[in-house]
Image (cartoon, grey):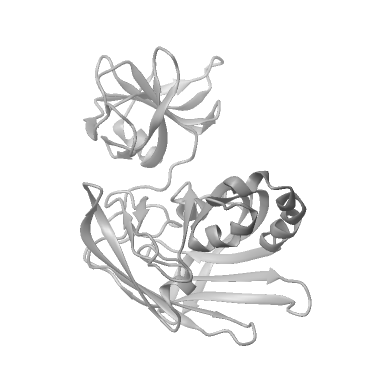
Amino acid sequence: MKTLSASALAAFDGSYAVKVFDGNSFSELGGGTLVLSGSALQFTPAAGLSGSTAAAATISAVCENTDASGKAIGVVAVIDANRHIDFFSPAFSGLYTSGSDLGSSGNRYMQGSTAKAGGAASPGAGSNECAPLVAKAGDSVTYRQSTNQSGSTPYTVRYDFSAGSYKGQAATVGTVSVVGVTAAQAGVGNFYLDPVTGVALGQDAAAAGANDTVTSYDPPDWQQRLSNAGIPGGSSGKINVTATITGKSVTDAFAPLGGASAIVMKYEFVVNRDANESVSTAAGSFANACKFRVEFALKDFQVQGPAASSPLLATMLPILQSSFAVPTNTTLWTSNAVPFMLPKSVTTMTLAAPVGTVISTQELIAVTKAPR
C-alpha cells in the first residue's frame, strides 16, 4: 500500500457511530462511538456493551486504501502491527469505517455505516461549516418559538451548559429554562452531551404531571446528522429516524384497548442543500450560514404492548397514522459560530381545514460562548 502523510487523515476527522462484532460468530455485541481527531483515536462504548472500556490510541502510519481495481477509496490508519482502522470516502460497501475494536483485547471488530457527525471543534468555530459548535461549560443559548396559529403563545427556551456527569462518565449538562409555557408543553428537559463530540448521551425523565411523556430518538444525535446530511452543490441526502414515545399519556390513551408501553414512529427525512447565505436573527447576523430544505414523511407507526393485538386498534390505526403524517417542510440555517443550536428554522405544516397552513419559527435571540 502507498504510504501517505498524516495530513491525509484530516478529511476523516469526526465522530463515527460504530457497532462492535464478535470475530468468531460475527454476531453484533453492541455499539459505541469512535472519534478521530488528528492522529488520535478515542473509543467510547455504549451502555450495555460488555467487556469493553473507553480507550485511546495513536495512529503511527497512514496508507492509501484501494479497491480491487486500484481505485482509491479511503485511508488505512495503522495503530500498530496488530491493529488498524479503515476510513472510507464515499462509503465503501455501505461502510464509512471498519477495523480493530479498541475497547477490548478479545477477537472483536467494529464497523460504522453512518457518515461522521462532524469534525472536532477549533478554538473559534466548528471545522465543519454547517455543524454547530460542540457545547461546553459556560455556553448559553436562548431561542424564541412562535407560530401564526390563532391562539398560540410565543415562548422562549434557554440552554445553560455546565460540566457534569452521566451514568459515571464525564458529560456536558444542558439545563433548560422555559418562559411562556411549561417545559412539558415545549417538549424539552435537561440533557447530557459527550463533552468531546457533542453526541447526546441521555436526558432526564419528564417531571410527573399531565404531560408525563418522554420521546427518545434513534440515532440520538439525529439533528446533528440532519445538519450534515446535505450534499454540497444542491444534491440530496436522507436520514432515517425512529422516535419512541413513552409515559403516562401513552399508557392512559390506550388503557381501554388493554394498555400500551410505547408508540414507535419511523420517519424518513430528505435533505436538500442550498447555497450558503447570511441569516439575520435577534441575536445577530450569521454570514455564510448553511441553508437546508427538509421534508419528512412517516414510514411506519406502531403501538407496542397489549393494545397492539386489539381488533379495535386495527380500525383506529389509519386515523392515528394520519394525525402524525402531516405534510411538513422545514427551512433551516446552521452555523459553526453557534454552540449547540441553529440560528433559525421555519417549519410549514399543511393541516386539514379549517386550520390550513401553520408556520412555526424558531429563532436565536441570545448567545454566550465560553472561551475556546
Location of the N terminus by quadrant is top left
Q: Residue at x 73, y 52 (%)?
A: 312
Location of the C terminus by quadrant is bottom left
Residue 197 appears in the picture as rendered: yes
Which image quarter: residue 116? top left
Q: Residue furthest bottom?
A: 151
Q: Is residue 144 above or below residue 23?
A: below
Q: In this rendering, would 11 be left or right of 61?
A: right
Q: In this view, does 329 lie above or below 96?
A: below
Q: Which residue is drawn at 34% across and 38% down?
A: 46
Q: In this view, does 14 lie above or below 362?
A: above
Front one among 41 and 148: 148
Residue 254 appears in the picture as rendered: no
Q: Position of residue 265 (x, y in %)?
A: 60, 51
Front one among 182 and 335: 182
Q: Where is residue 25 in the image (x, y as percent from the top left)?
A: 43, 14
Which image quarter: residue 13? top left
Which image quarter: residue 207? bottom left
Q: Where is residue 266 in the image (x, y as percent from the top left)?
A: 61, 48
Q: In this rendering, would 19 be left or right of 196?
A: right
